[in-house]
Image (spheres, rainbow, N blue to C red):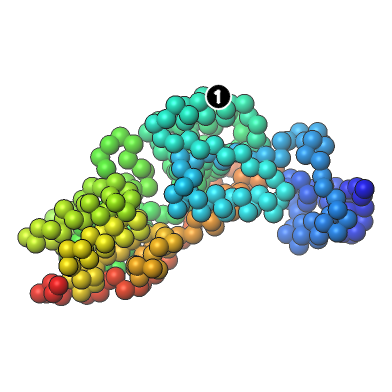
Amino acid sequence: MSGITEVAERAGVSKATASRALSGTGYVSEATRRRVRDAADELGYVPSAGAVGLATGRTQNIGVVMPYVNRWFFAEVLEGIQQALLERGLDLTLYDAKPGTEERARIFGDFLARKRFDGLIAVGLEPADHELERLTRIGRPIVSVVGTGGEASVIAVDDDYTARRATEHLIGLGHRDIVFIGGRPERHWAHVDQMRLAGYRHAMRDAGLSEQAVHARSEVSMPGGYAAAVDLLSDARRRPTAIVGVCDEVAIGAIIAARRLGIQVPAALSVVGIDDHEFADMFALTTLQQVPRMQGAAAVEMLLTEIADPQRERTTLRIPTRLIVRNTTAPPHTDRAQ
């Protein structure tokens, strides 16, 4: 069986470089990493996780903790993380920490403290319970995908700006009666939702429309958006000409509600969302696009850099969003034709 020496010779690099390329530790250019992995594949070489661990003092395993694995955003982030780790030959341990469950308490109180990983990617943790601060005490590098930072590096979009841009798109079309749907008043209301509501209010304020700003609370889901929109749109006296959904799922729920009430979108009601969810194109939804898989891959890159250099200064990377104009927004009709 071929060893690391043969792999290095085949790839034309030193043993140290070949070892770094296969273990995912230290800097190796992508071109060299691919060449070494190709050489390993050709020779049928598979590095022993135990041997790599003994040589590097690391587990070759990355922990990922998130509140949901079956929701679009989290599933997409996880795909990005997994692909990036697979490309580097690293393992992944997933902690599905659903809010308000005993399992979540055990994960934070026991499993994570065992430190069976070289670093941790925390996805969508909220500041209410100071969970990110608790994780930093574990003594492993941490990158947060969506979050408030603190002692951990952060990968995120600028949610305030994104919602502001969505609202400004409607204002630019001539809308003045614009309602924001999404987010509840409970203690565990997501930080992301709060920032998006703030962005909507900033845009309304800057346009001199603060008095017209309305927040319709709802569960952050299609059924939640549907229920809130039915209540909002069924009263013609307070019916807006446009809706900003806190996310695409809420916006799609609002579109379904409008259709069932006989309200034409966008002739009588414009709707814009945030995310570019996998269903957005099917509903021709105008939205602000983010790419969760890109955020997952970026989190892996940032985390591995911090594992290699634990003294590296913590950073925040804001990934830009892009306005995708489809068929759910148009200038308002003064007669609100239906």
Q: Quadrant of the C terminus?
A: bottom left
Q: Which residue is mark 1?
A: 110
Residue type at mark 1: give it.
Answer: Asp
- Categorize mark 1 by other alpha carbons within 10 Å: few (<14), some (14-19), many (20+): few
Q: Nearer the viewer, residue 56 or 76?
A: 76
Residue at the spot x=26%, y=62% of the render? 256
Q: Indicate whether 278 appears above or below 174.
A: above
Looking at the image, residue 98 lies above or below residue 324 = above
Residue with the most extreme left position: 237
- Comparing 260 with 291, the one in front is 260
12 lies above or below 140: below
Rendered image quadrant of residue 48: top right
Residue at the location (17% across, 63% down)? 261
Q: Which percent across, then down, holds residue 42?
A: 86, 59
- Identify the element where label 1 is drawn: helix
Q: Is residue 154 left or right of residue 335?
A: right
The residue most toward the front is 260
- Residue at image position (92%, 56%) is 9
